[in-house]
Image (spheres, grey):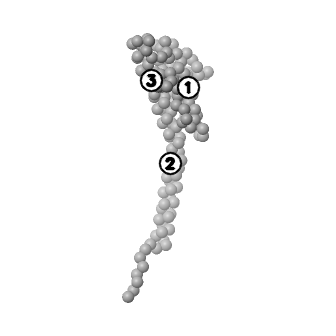
């Protein structure tokens, strides 16, 4: 009686290791850059929330001036968010500036629009920006 051993040969095992190594070399750079994509998505979502909040506030305050809050600059658009503050504890800091001003703090006249820039500076990595528009209302 002959005992026949079954299993993988050394060549087959080496080929599997080589294929896994190539897949890992291709996949790892994709996963390491996810934080930059996440930061960009976060800035876009906060900028969208600021624009939506400012637009809703403008509509509400136009209908009834005692409701809502005054928006007189890009920085005061934060008051239209729930909690009247930018997100914190996100691994960095947010800052708002007027896109058309060198100093970053230009007043927005009533019923006038202004383009604003939201910048997220992460604790590691490069800063990410997004723009949004506010309409001034007293």
Q: Which mark is residue 53?
A: 3
Q: Nearer the viewer, residue 133 or 86?
A: 86
Mark 3 vs mark 1, foreground winner is 3
Mark 2 vs mark 3, foreground winner is 3
Q: Position of residue 92 (x, y in %)?
A: 57, 35
Question: Of helix, strand and loop, which one carries label 1?
Answer: strand
Q: Earlier in the sequence, mark 2 or mark 1?
A: 2
Q: Nearer the viewer, residue 124 or 17?
A: 124
* Contact, mark 3 vs mark 1 (Cβ under 8 Å): no
Q: Earlier in the sequence, mark 3 or mark 1?
A: 3
Tag 2 residue:
30
* Contact, mark 2 vs mark 3 (Cβ under 8 Å): no
* Residue 16 visible in the shown view: yes
Q: Disc 2 versus disc 1: distance between alpha carbons?
A: 30 Å
Q: Residue at x 50, y 33 (%)?
A: 43
Mark 2 vs mark 1, foreground winner is 1
Q: Disc 2 versus disc 3: distance between alpha carbons?
A: 34 Å
Q: Is residue 121 left or right of residue 37?
A: right
Q: Residues within 10 Å of mark 1 (few under 14, many from 20)?
A: many
Q: Which mark is residue 87?
A: none
* Contact, mark 2 vs mark 1 (Cβ under 8 Å): no
User: Compared with residue 54, is residue 34 higher up or lower down, i.e. above or below?
Assistant: below
Q: Residue at x 43, y 25 (%)?
A: 52
Q: Disc 3 versus disc 1: distance between alpha carbons?
A: 15 Å
User: Compared with residue 49, is residue 125 higher up or lower down, i.e. above or below?
Assistant: below
Question: Of helix, strand and loop, which one carries label 2?
Answer: helix
User: Compared with residue 38, is residue 71 higher up or lower down, i.e. above or below?
Assistant: above
Question: Of helix, strand and loop, which one carries label 3?
Answer: helix
Q: Position of residue 11 (x, y in %)?
A: 48, 71
Q: Residue at x 46, y 32 (%)?
A: 45
Tag 1 residue:
96
């Amino acid at each position: 009686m002959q005992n026949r051993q079954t299993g993988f040969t050394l060549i087959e095992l080496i080929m599997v290791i080589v294929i896994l190594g190539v897949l890992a070399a291709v996949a790892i750079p994709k996963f390491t850059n996810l934080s930059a994509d996440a930061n960009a998505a976060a800035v876009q979502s906060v900028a969208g929330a600021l624009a939506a909040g400012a637009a809703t506030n403008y509509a509400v305050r136009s209908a009834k001036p005692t409701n809502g809050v005054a928006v007189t600059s890009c920085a005061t658009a934060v008051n239209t968010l729930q909690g009247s503050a930018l997100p914190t504890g996100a691994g960095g800091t947010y800052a708002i500036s007027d896109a058309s001003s060198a100093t970053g703090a230009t007043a927005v006249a009533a019923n006038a629009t202004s383009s604003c820039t939201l910048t997220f500076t992460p604790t590691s990595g490069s800063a990410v920006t997004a723009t949004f528009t506010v309409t001034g209302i007293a």
